[in-house]
Amino acid sequence: MRNLFLVLLFFGIFVGIQIALFQSDNDSEIEANFDEVISSVVQIESTDYRGGKTFGSGVIVSKDGYIITAYHLLINSQNLMVKSNEVEISTKIIGFDQFSDIAVVKVDLNNLRPIELPELKQLNIGKQVFAIGNPYNLGISVSSGIISATNRHFGNPYLEIIQTDASINKGNSGGALVDENGKFLGLNISIASISGGSEGVGFALPAEKVISIAEEIIKHGKVKKAWFGNFSFRNIIYKNSAGDQKRGLQVIGDDQNIKNGLKNLDIIVSVKDSEPIWSTLRDVMNSLSPGDILELIVIRDGKVIPLSLVTIERPERIQI
């Protein structure tokens, strides 16, 4: 009996050591990975014409110096500096898209470490994530949390913003939200806080959209915007099939450039399941690229019709 006890005790100790070693190896891999990932995120300092400074973060996306960041950090910027590995580097603004709050800047350096991109997959609520950035201009640091929600849109159903409880503070804007392997999931853009500090609600634009916009800025210096025709709109109240009064957008005019598009006197009753008001439609169009699908539901001649419009490139002279 005593021998059996000793055998079981030895076996338990052996298994415990193996588990501890396995956990230690995994922890070391994660730590080593994040030592590398941090080198793909930089500090950004923007100085306006009055000498006021704004601090934030940026994410390296190419070996030859292209960096993505948050557009709001660059507003009124007269001098822009990037700090990486304690070295400050003068920076050139390549372009920006104010509607998505994304900008691209460039430094004259080579052999930088770009952030790694994950394979496209659905983000699950509860997934562990890490926010990397420059909180309060203290330097690059990492905080952890989970994905709290997905597809937040704040009136624009095409933004599909990620919500996280990872600590995001002032200075984290433009930084990276990454997974446990250090792969880029999103660009940190804002916090929801009364105090201005982290209160467990931070937001990031999904990586797929960020990279798509950044590539267009790098190629064209701007983002080409989608267009669905030259119309006017009027806010109206209409009655639905149940006799209830609802808000809608009435279309004024015709445009033959969009195949199977809107027609005069159509009433838009839904913009991708969101309320049919002009500000929603405007924000949606400013977040789509030419060729993207605009999903609407309209009432035409008394019938409810779903429309999937293939957008075209917006003419330069038109701003909305």
Image (cartoon, rainbow, N blue to C red):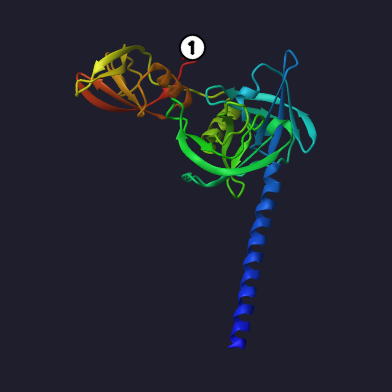
| Image quadrant where residue 101 sits | top right
* Residue drawn at the location 67% of the way across and 61% of the way down: 24
* Residue drawn at the location 52% of the way across and 47% of the way down: 127
Q: Position of residue 102 (x, y in %)?
A: 58, 27
Secondary element at image label 1: loop
Residue situated furthest front in the rendering: 2
Foreground residue, 91 or 268? 268
Foreground residue, 55 or 202? 202
| Image quadrant where residue 239 sits | top left
Give the residue at mark 1. Answer: 317
Foreground residue, 159 or 134? 134
* Residue drawn at the location 45% of the way across and 19% of the way down: 314
Q: Position of residue 35 (x, y in %)?
A: 71, 47
* Residue drawn at the location 62% of the way across and 47% of the way down: 182
Q: Amino acid at mark 1?
A: Arg
Q: Position of residue 2 (x, y in %)?
A: 61, 87
Q: Is residue 123 above or below residue 320?
A: below
Residue situated furthest right in the rendering: 87
